Amino acid sequence: MPNEHSLSIWGLIANASLLVQLVMAILFLASVVSWVMIIQRGMYQSRARAKFLAFEKKFWSGIDLNQLYRQSNGNNAVDGVENIFRAGFKEFMRLRSQSSADSDAVMEGCQRAMRVALAREEEKLETNLPFLASVASVSPYIGLFGTVWGIMNSFRGLANVHQATLATVAPGISEALVATAMGLFAAIPAVLAYNRFSARAESMENHYQTFAEEFSSILHRQVHSKQVSS
Amino acid sequence: MNNQSQFVIAAIVSVFLHALLLAGITLGWESTSDPTPRVFKPRYVEAKLVELKAQDTKAPAQKKNNVIDLTKKRELEQQRAEAAKRAKEEAARQRRVERERKAKAEAKKKRDQEAERKRQQALEAKRRAEADAAKAKAERERQERIAEERLDDAMRKEEQQRQAQLAAQQTQSYVNMISSRIEQNWSRPPSARRGMKVELLIQLVPTGQVVNVTVVRSSGNAAFDRSAEQAVRRIDRFSELRNMPPTLFEENFRQLKLVFDPKDLRL
């Protein structure tokens, strides 16, 4: 039994068995990566929200749609709801330039294009969320596994000792419990972030859908007014 | 700001956060739990031989080196035996001398009386003076002898004391050994508390075999008493006692009284 058991956290980690150390390393890595995801998601979603609000404001300000389309023509870093608008409007312009297409075909084409763009945006909003979910659900188990293994070893060592005092078992158990602590440490932020980000993604999707519907109603009005006039 | 740069920023922030956390944990952990729990108390039993308490105080300095060295022990034993023999011889000699002296003194007295009678009868001044001189001489001799005897006595006493000290030391070391063996084998019940004392009477035979164990004075907790008794019974034989000089064994170890009070319990 190593008597000069260093009880600092580094001592505990260094004295753990190889498997427990491996578990700890996995958990630490999972924590780091999940935090990368959390920060990146947070930044992306808040930016998407800001962009959506700004675009909606601009859209309903009475600006000409052609002008709006041309404004964002230059930069290719178009994101979020603008993509939906551009997909729908591009399709609308193309179909309308072909004189043969009737109004229902134009509307259908526009709606399809917007649906595709919407699906892409949804996908963008939800990337990496499955990773967070799996970290949230699995890392407590991994930590628990490390702990059980460590305690198992510590009790096996205890079997050789004549008189079991608390001092002979405690370092091993403490060392094993570090793994559970790390598992929980990785899991808790991941759970919170997953819930928050999936809720936010859903609300953004709803916003996008609403916008797509509104925009298609505008296009619909334009197509039919043209038909009536022509 | 595209996705790539976003990822880089996120990665940097995340790694920084973790580094910060690790540093915090390390520092916080060290400062809170460093000083106390690293001091593991050494486990020991305070076992005292009840009869030897008075002598223990006499030789506190020598008590420390109670390591059992077999050769040293044998040497000591020899020395002891020799010393005992010497002491006996000395005593015999002393007694003889004393007897002789007494006999002589008596004879002299008789002679003196006779001389006195003769002197009275003969009234010879010369003889009287002679007798006086002889008397004075005898007196002087006697004084010398008494002084010598006193010196011898003191030396003998000192030797005896040294022997006793040595024996006490040996006894103490054996007792320590026995009590540490018992301590190792002693699994105390959960109800054991600090301050409990149990006095055991262990009956041994010269091979070190335990013949009988009885609780002389209970600690008040039956489970505790029983556990101590069990510990002795489990050891069954103190094989170290085989090499002990028999006189020492007879003196102290045939009926050994030990007091156990576990001071290492954290209760």
Image (cartoon, coloured by chain):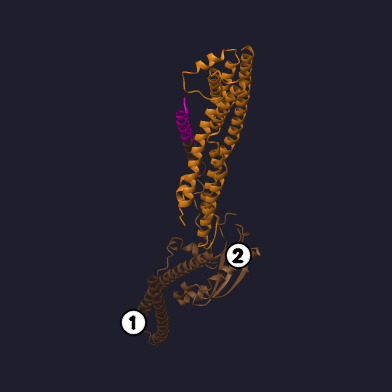
Chain colours: A orange, B brown
Label 2 lies in what chain? Answer: B
Q: Position of residue A34 (x, y in %)?
A: 51, 37
**Above or below, B10 relative to A220:** below
Q: Which of the image's four quarters has the C terminus of chain A? A: top right
Q: Position of residue B205 (x, y in %)?
A: 52, 77
Q: Position of residue B248 (x, y in %)?
A: 47, 74
Image label count? 2
Q: Which residue is mark 1?
A: B126
The residue stretch that appears in magenta:
B1-17
Is B62 situated left or right of A140 in this image?
left
**Above or below, B203 relative to A183:** below
Residue B34 visible within the image: no
Q: Which residue is mark 2?
A: B198
The amino acid at mark 2 is: Val
The amino acid at mark 1 is: Lys
Examine the residues drawn in magenta and state their main secondary structure: helix
**Above or below, A122 relative to B153:** above
Report helix, strand or loop for mark 2: strand
Q: Residue at x 51, y 56 (%)?
A: A153
Q: Which sits earlier in the primary sequence, circle 2 or circle 1?
A: 1
The verdict on residue A68 being magenta is: no
Is A151 in front, or is B140?
A151
